[in-house]
Image (spheres, rainbow, N blue to C red):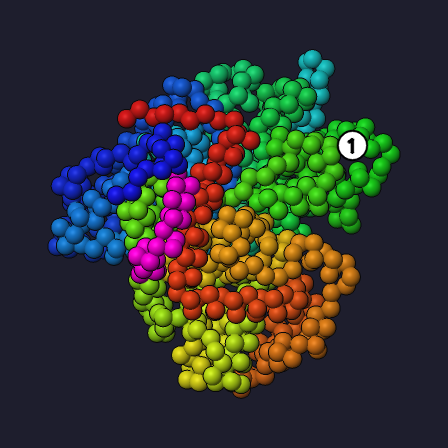
């Protein structure tokens, strides 16, 4: 038994998880009852899918009880709430998460075991709720988990996509996209709320009228109207006390304009309009970090913002009537990137055109309501919409944006008289050949606070992206470093490590992750090292089994498991990892006794369907993998795995088994990263650049427990300023040259020379925009250090333990606390049980 440390005493104000609301017998009875009465089957006929649904239904009963109590508490206390607007919520599976948060996981496991059913198999039946692309969408999911856990009044608003992110298949090494159908057989968690349907206008024209008071009035005559149908997903906090909701909008034909057509015998024509309306929420755009400029995407954004604002205002009016004076006391809206930025002119339209507030009053309300999170500096990801497109779809909003801009330009003139360069830089309108509306500028101007997602990123937002805005409003720009929920990303996904930690420091760490520092005193303890590394080894064996099932490959579980999992993007540099793998392969061929510990390189990544080079890199990884894995000269030391269809539920299997975490983006390009935090929390050691949150991870774990390599942000800028030429590295570094030339032969693609050439060319004639060649030697050297460190078992165990021990900062509870203190000004609402 260990003594309680100061940290855990301080945390004891945070409530311990409640004793389960049901015992094993009661839960068993509830599951069987749902099998009979909800599923219409019985114990003998039911397959795992039916057992999954029945188990969900049994758990959902408790979830809904919590939801009802939470809503009652929030209503009676008239609480201020945060409204998290996000085009993406990457929730993953919910059953395991909800059971853990209700402290019913063990009970359910026992109950199902007695029924002769494996909980593990049942959990595998659940399709991932993949309504997001990557980090940005998963961050939203972690944040709503933390908000509920911390008992903050909060609601997530987004889109009820019929198809989430595509399912990836690999055929002959290449990515194929298949539609994701996550709710084809029903979703047991969601509740339709027809009583809260909203209508949204689109297209049409604006009429200018003169009111009785002589005021100019604008009236938008829409060309079409669609319905937004809300689906609520309960979000259970850890401990099960607060249950918030994620409200997702599904588009539906309003039938409003269709009646004439319909009655005139136009049954078929009316169906066409239905199809158009229902297209809005059909499918998630699969482009991560690229602005597509597509009309449907803008309509999606406006659709969910307009529905959500109407919903918020309806709820506000129910308590406060037409008195707008308390609106900003009750409502704060967080914009997850610029995707929901159209909410700013929409709120102005409601206040000015509908509520008939004067402009200044309305603007004051608006700029006290919105806060904006920036997640990238990549120019291709900064959203801009053609003014012509806005004019067509949202004519009144374009007028309002012009008015916001006009008034803002007057402010800029006051601050920098006569400086037209600054004006054209800060203007919401970009006066290029095609006039564009800059959603980033609109978001900064319309928000009271703007944050970046890691220290270095926020610094660059201030210094490079929005320096003049920072001068104009020195308090506005700030930092909130990202975080991850330790409930999903340690407790639920790594039960063996969680149990070991519980035994050492108690079971309160999921609520106060800084308590993990208490593990640091055992970092040199031989027994603890053995236990910790035994857990890692068992997790590697389990992942090896998954690899076998998914790819047919048998991997060496004594090898270093080296994992890179994230969307495929040049800036994330999966191809730098690949170059290094090719270097190892070549060294092994040239020198069969080349001294390296066996290593398995494991990738998971989806490429945007239209991103050719990203797909080429996936193809190259698969072709190189095929060759290496079948080459008996090297495959005892080197193996390469590409796991298809990377997603939240696969991440949960990979992360606990990682020895090495690859976080190798070009410095300055990865805003934060969150996979870096998940892997380190599970005892993986990072090989990383000084980019995003890697810098803060290095500060926490210390230089001895991380492998940092590569150019810094300043060095990258300096190299680009001087003029970077990848040819210099190609011609001066024989290994780089040999590897790149190898890619152009048919060695990896027999009979098809040049099949991998695009990867080479992107790094030479393509200019190597992300400096793979410049960082190659440094990366390769870092990997040699990894190899040496791993061979020293004691040293490695200590490093792994220290990574887990020092990750406390990166709980999303801390991120949420920062938002609460620095942005939202919320107070918790204790929900009575
Ligand atoms: F481009 N991120 C993402 F900024 O996953 F909008 N998708 C995106 O479209 C964007 C950002 C956007 C990621 C960042 O790349 C990552 O560094 C960060 O950790 C994550 O957002 C959450 O902040």
- Queried whether the magenta region covers residue 517, the answer comes back as yes
Q: Is residue 14 visible?
A: no
Q: Residue at x 61, y 36 (%)?
A: 478
Q: Nearer the viewer, residue 449 or 699?
A: 699
Q: Is residue 252 left or right of residue 472?
A: left
Give the class, few, some or many, for how many residues have Cα within 10 Å of label 1's Cα (few <14, many ≥20): many
Residue segment shown in magenta: 512-536
Q: Residue at x 61, y 23 (%)?
A: 365
Quarter occupied by the N terminus: top left
Q: Residue at x 42, y 69 (%)?
A: 791
Q: Is residue 70 left or right of residue 631?
A: left
Q: Position of residue 102 (x, y in %)?
A: 28, 38
Please tell me in which quadrant of the rendered image residue 155 appears: top left
Q: Nearer the viewer, residue 469 or 14?
A: 14
Please tell me in which quadrant of the rendered image residue 393 appears: top right
Which element is circle 1 on? helix
Q: Is residue 714 visible?
A: yes
Q: Nearer the viewer, residue 432 or 325?
A: 325
Q: Report the magenta stretch's main SS.
A: helix
For the image shown, how many numbered marks are present on the structure?
Answer: 1
Q: Is residue 519 above or below residue 73?
A: below
Q: For mark 1, what is the residue?
A: 412
Q: Position of residue 716 (x, y in %)?
A: 69, 58
Q: Is residue 481 above or below residue 44?
A: above
Q: Which residue is situated farthest in the right direction here?
A: 418
Q: Residue at x 43, y 61 (%)?
A: 795
Quarter occupied by the C terminus: top left
Q: Is residue 219 left or right of residue 84?
A: right
- Queried whether the magenta region covers residue 237, the answer comes back as no
């Amino acid at each position: 038994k260990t003594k309680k440390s100061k940290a855990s005493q301080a945390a004891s104000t945070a409530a311990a998880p409640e004793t389960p609301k049901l015992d094993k017998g009661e839960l068993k009875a509830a599951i069987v009852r749902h099998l009979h009465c909800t599923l219409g089957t019985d114990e003998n006929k039911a397959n795992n899918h039916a057992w999954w649904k029945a188990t969900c239904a049994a758990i959902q009963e408790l979830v809904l009880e919590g939801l009802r109590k939470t809503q009652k508490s929030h209503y009676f206390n008239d609480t201020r709430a945060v409204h998290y607007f996000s085009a993406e919520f990457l929730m993953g599976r919910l059953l395991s998460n909800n059971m853990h948060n209700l402290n019913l996981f063990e009970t359910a496991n026992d109950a199902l075991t007695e029924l002769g059913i494996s909980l593990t198999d049942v959990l595998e039946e659940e399709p991932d709720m993949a309504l997001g692309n990557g980090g940005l969408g998963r961050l939203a999911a972690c944040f709503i988990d933390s908000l509920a856990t911390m008992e903050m009044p909060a609601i997530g608003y987004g889109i009820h996509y019929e198809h989430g992110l595509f399912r990836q298949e690999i055929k002959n090494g290449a990515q194929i996209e298949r539609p994701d159908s996550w709710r084809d057989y029903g979703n047991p968690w969601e509740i339709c709320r027809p009583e809260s349907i909203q209508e949204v206008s689109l297209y049409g024209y604006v009429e200018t009228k003169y009111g009785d008071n002589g005021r100019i009035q604008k009236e938008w005559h829409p060309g079409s109207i669609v319905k937004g149908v809300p689906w609520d997903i309960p979000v259970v906090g850890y401990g099960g006390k607060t249950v918030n909701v994620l409200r997702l909008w599904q588009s539906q034909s309003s039938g409003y304009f269709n009646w004439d057509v319909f009655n005139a015998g136009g049954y078929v024509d009316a169906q066409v309009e239905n199809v158009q309306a229902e297209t809005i929420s059909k499918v998630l755009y699969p482009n991560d970090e690229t602005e597509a400029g597509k009309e449907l995407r803008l309509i999606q954004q406006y659709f969910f913002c307009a529905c959500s604002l109407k919903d918020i205002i309806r709820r506000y009016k129910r308590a406060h009537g037409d008195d707008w004076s308390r609106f900003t006391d009750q409502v704060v809206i967080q914009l997850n990137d610029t995707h929901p930025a159209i909410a700013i002119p929409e709120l102005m339209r409601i206040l000015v055109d509908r509520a008939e507030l004067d402009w200044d009053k309305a603007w004051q309300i608006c700029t006290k309501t919105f806060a904006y999170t920036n997640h990238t500096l990549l120019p291709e990801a900064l959203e801009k919409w053609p003014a012509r497109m806005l004019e067509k779809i949202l004519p009144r909003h374009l007028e309002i944006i012009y008015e916001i801009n006009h008034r803002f330009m007057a402010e800029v003139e006051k601050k920098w008289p006569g400086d037209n360069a600054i004006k054209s830089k800060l203007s919401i309108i970009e006066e290029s050949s095609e006039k564009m509306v800059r959603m980033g500028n609109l978001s900064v101007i319309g928000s009271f606070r703007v944050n970046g997602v890691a220290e270095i990123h926020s610094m660059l937002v201030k210094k490079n992206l929005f320096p003049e805005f920072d001068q104009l409003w020195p308090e506005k720009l700030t930092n909130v470093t990202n975080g991850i929920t330790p409930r999903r990303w340690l407790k639920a996904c790594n039960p063996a490590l969680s149990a070991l930690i519980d035994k050492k420091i108690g079971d309160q760490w999921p609520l106060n992750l800084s308590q993990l520092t208490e593990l640091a005193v055992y970092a040199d303890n031989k027994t603890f090292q053995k236990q910790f590394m035994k857990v890692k080894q068992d997790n590697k064996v389990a992942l090896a089994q998954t690899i076998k099932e998914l790819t047919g490959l048998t991997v060496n579980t004594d090898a270093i498991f080296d994992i890179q999992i994230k969307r495929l993007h040049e800036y994330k540099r999966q191809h730098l990892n690949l170059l290094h793998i090719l270097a190892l392969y070549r060294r092994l061929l040239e020198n069969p006794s080349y001294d390296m510990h066996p290593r398995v390189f494991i990738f998971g990544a989806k490429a945007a369907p239209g991103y050719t080079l990203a797909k080429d890199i996936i193809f190259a990884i698969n072709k190189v993998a095929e060759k290496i894995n079948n080459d008996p000269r090297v495959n005892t030391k080197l193996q390469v795995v590409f796991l298809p269809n990377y997603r939240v539920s696969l991440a949960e299997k990979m992360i606990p088994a990682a020895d090495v975490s690859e976080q190798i983006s070009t410095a300055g390009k990865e805003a934060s990263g969150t996979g870096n935090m998940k892997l380190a929390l599970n005892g993986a050691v990072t090989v990383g650049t000084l980019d995003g949150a890697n810098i803060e991870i290095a500060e926490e774990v210390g230089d001895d427990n991380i492998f940092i390599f590569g150019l810094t942000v300043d060095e990258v800028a300096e190299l680009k300023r001087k003029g970077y030429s990848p040819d210099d590295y190609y011609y001066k570094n024989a290994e780089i040259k040999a590897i790149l030339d190898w890619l152009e032969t048919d060695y990896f693609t027999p009979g098809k020379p040049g099949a991998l050439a695009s990867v080479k060319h992107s790094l030479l004639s393509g200019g190597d925009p992300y400096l793979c060649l410049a960082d190659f030697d440094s990366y390769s050297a870092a990997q040699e250090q990894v190899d040496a460190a791993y061979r020293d078992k004691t040293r490695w165990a200590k490093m792994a333990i220290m990574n887990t021990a020092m990750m406390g900062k990166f709980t999303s509870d801390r991120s949420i606390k920062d938002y609460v203190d620095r942005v939202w000004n919320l107070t918790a609402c204790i929900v009575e049980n």
